Amino acid sequence: MWGTLAQVAIGGALGAMARFGTQSLSFRLFGPHFPVGTMAVNGLGSFLMGLLAALLIDRDIARFAPGLLVGFLGAYTTFSTYALDALRLWERGEAALATGYVLGTVVLSIGACVAGMAIGRALFT
């Protein structure tokens, strides 16, 4: 049990640092007007979730799943930040942009997860 908790804690710390780095870079590259960083981490995180699920779960080597799926990707992806970003766009009176962001992130994230799973299964089975 303690080993699993340690995996989650270490994975979570690394995922949070990766998220901070991704969002900081995005802010410098694209500015503060649209939450590109949040959308990027959710899309990439969803792709990695599908890819790693195909590797770890489908091949029954799930001993690394807590650290990678729950810890790292749980901290890396940012649903709560996504919700706040959407709300802030809405409150600024940018309803169309907020709606596009919400729908775009959902479509990107699910599509990325499907792509990751398909690629993972092709590579690992």
Image (spheres, rainbow, N blue to C red):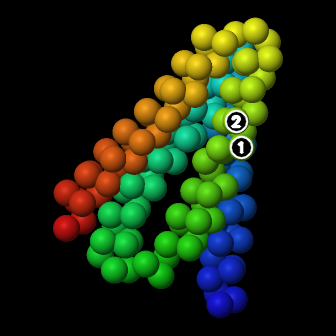
Above or below 4: residue 18: above
Which amino acid type is shown beneath numbered disc 1? Answer: Ser
Element type at mark 1:
helix
Q: Residues within 10 Å of mark 2 (few under 14, many from 20)?
A: few
Query: Where is the N terminus found, in terms of image quarters?
Result: bottom right
Q: Residues within 10 Å of mark 1 (few under 14, many from 20)?
A: few
Residue 89, x across and y down, in percent: 73, 18
Mark 1 in CB contact with mark 2 (< 8 angstroms): yes
Q: Is residue 58 left or right of residue 95?
A: left
Above or below 61: residue 20: above
Residue 75, x across and y down, in percent: 66, 55
Q: Which mark is residue 47?
A: none
Residue for point 69% across, 79% down: 6
Which residue lies under the disc numbered 1? 80
Which residue lies under the disc numbered 2? 83
Q: From where the camera sits, is residue 31 visible?
A: no
Count of all numbered marks drawn on residues in the image: 2
Residue 47, x across and y down, in percent: 42, 47
Residue found at the very far bottom of the displayed protein? 1
Q: Quadrant of residue 117?
A: bottom left
Above or below 117: residue 70: below
Above or below 22: residue 32: above
Residue 125, x across and y down, in percent: 19, 67
Q: Quadrant of residue 84?
A: top right
Q: From where the camera sits, is residue 7 visible?
A: yes
Which amino acid type is shown beneath numbered disc 2? Answer: Ala
Q: How far, Cα to Cα, is label 1 from label 2? A: 5 Å
Element type at mark 2:
helix
Q: Is residue 38 left or right of residue 44?
A: right
